[in-house]
Amino acid sequence: MGKHARDAGGDFRAADAAKAGASSAPIAGQAPPDDLTILERIVEGTGHATGEAFLQSLVRSLASVLNVRYAFVAEFAGVPTRVRTLAFWAAGRIAENVEWDLAGTPCEEVVAGRLCHHPAGVSRLFPRDAPLVEMRIESYLGVPLIGARGETLGHLAVFDERPMPHEPRGLSVFRIFAQRAGAELDRLHTERSLRESERQFRDLFEQAPIGYVYEDTETRFLSANSTALKMLGVRPEEVRDTVGLTLVADTPENQARVRQSIAAEQAGRELPCIELELRRKDNGRPVWVQRWSRPEPGGRHTRTMIIDITERVLAERERSRLQQQNVYLQEEIKSVHNFEEIVGRSAALREVLAKVELVAGTEATVLITGETGVGKELIARAIHSRSRRAGRPLIKVNCAALPTGLVESELFGHEKGAFTGAVNRRIGRFELAEGGTIFLDEIGELPLDVQVKLLRILQEREFERIGGAKTIRADVRIIAATNRDLPAAIASGAFRQDLYYRLNVFPLHAPALRERREDIPLLVHYFVKRSAAQVGRAIEHIAPHTLKRLIEYDWPGNVRELENIVERAVILSPGPELLVPESVLAATAPVSAAAAAGANPPLPGALDRTLEQVEREHIIATLQSTKWLVEGEHGAARSLGLHPNTLRSRMKRLGIQRSAEAAS
């Protein structure tokens, strides 16, 4: 029974015998009082007490009624093999509660669900129970305490140094006390369970990811969980002074939504979830929430739930901004490069486009040849956009524009520390093009050592970064282009023959503009329309003799030269008719005799001005007319038909500054 039980017994044995027998109750084994007297003693002893006080009174009364010196109520101590007392009467007083293992004790039989009565010889029957042996306990009576659901909650027991003969009336009395003890223990367990459940629910309420607010129908806060307080920037002491409506962002849409919701709550109706933009109380910073509200019966209070969706809203806004930016950039790109449209219907061009359609759906490597300015990049883009890789990137590399020492790094990347200046890892163009297409323009300018690596990609579809040991697989389609005579470069040792054969799987020759003169009128009209919009001109007519001269010109610079000539002519044309002075063509390259015969007289001073000079003068004149206002309805960008950022870029390129030009 434990050390405390043993000490309590020793104290009693040392007490005066007369004092011990002062009670008028019968001794152990004598007939107990009648049932009415028992009930009266229980009521008198317990009164209105509950819990520990009730149980202490119960064991005191039980010991008195049965005339025993020890009585206790015990429950399980966390595990079914160990118990602890809730109230312990020992030798005339309430003793300190004790805890012990059941094994080897008479209590072990009781908690198994059986009444246990040992009238005598307890110390001999349970020698492992040292406290009982030391206290010379002779008799023991115990009964399990059963809960409302039939489970064993603990047990009630009495024991004494004297024998306790079997006496039916005594057992009946004992059972009455046991029933009352069981009922109280069941109540205590239920109360404890409710407290624990309440604590768990309160923790769940406070720490839930959803904010909960209890408010009246005028949105005055009555209580709120910690999640709602953190979300709204409200301190606990500010809850009663907070009006939810004051936290709603002052926009017509937000105000209309929340007032509609409040009106419904006041009418006792529940509205579906609404999204609101709020302002935190502590700093005004915006927070977006989803709000549900359920009015209570009577229409005076409502329970509101809010979920923070700020990250989602900001992410959607950022995604929308990027999408719009992407659309804008794509339009900017198309306006410069005309990726989606190759203008013309000549037989030579139709032959090229027919080959594009044939090869686009394959994975074949394509080599595009042709003079500078014929539109080799447009053909490469047409192949990519019609291929299965159209949803992946098309990466362009101008091999002639890359510094010789950096070509390999640009194409294949490098690891940190691979060479002097390699302070970070660099992803090469082939990795950027993964799953898509890489367009290697001016492939004839590639150094021989890099040609070897390119050949490996074409043969084995793999490469390594400079300074790296990891082999990287390359799922990339290669389209190459050149204006050089590659067979001649092979003969001179400047280009590898095996690489040429690998690149020249499907050759495509882009015809020069002079080889498809019937496309020139279409191209002229296309470039006039685009250039006129950019510089704010209204060109409505092209004279037949002007168009004839453009058709008969040799165009050594091909389509790119035609585009530049038309843009310059649009700038120089003061009226609705496109003027292409002879000087414009002459300043670019010699014209044919037929074209020279129909030339218009040159404008004064035109021979002395370049296209950049004309463009610069026109932009400055427009800026001066708008008092150097770039953006807005009356700005120079609107007059020139340009995006403000495009105009600023041209001003920077042409060296136009207000401080220098305003005084001129």
Image (cartoon, helix red, strand yellow):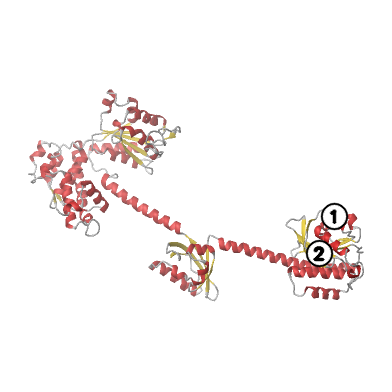
- Front-most of residues 659 and 164: 659
Where residue 364 appears, x then y in whole percent?
A: 36, 34
In the displayed structure, would residue 296 be above or below residue 86?
Answer: below
Residue that label 1 marks: 130
Between circles 1 and 2, the one closer to the viewer is: 1
Please determine whether, in this image, residue 119 is positioned above or below residue 661: below
Counting residues from the N terminus, which is met first, the one under dot 1 or under dot 2?
A: 2
The residue sitting at 21% across, 59% down in the picture is: 634
Residue 173 coordinates in the image, percent (x, y): 85, 69
Picture quadrant where residue 624 is located: bottom left
- Left or right: residue 424 versus residue 621 is right
Q: Residue at x 23, y 34 (%)?
A: 371
Kindly tell me whether residue 254 is visible in this rendering. yes
Q: Are marks 1 and 2 in contact (CB under 8 Å)?
A: no
Q: Secondary structure at mark 1?
A: helix
In this rendering, does residue 538 appear at all?
Answer: no
How far across and how far down the image is residue 208, in percent? 55, 60
- Identify the image quadrant of residue 350: top left
Q: Which mark is residue 72?
A: 2
- Give the number of marks: 2
> Which residue shows up at 29% across the image and 46% down it?
333
Label for residue 51?
Answer: none
The kind of residue tagged 1 is Ala
Q: Is residue 117 left or right of residue 632?
A: right
Q: For this view, does 59 lie left or right of residue 325?
A: right
Residue type at mark 2 is Phe
Quadrant housing residue 606: top left
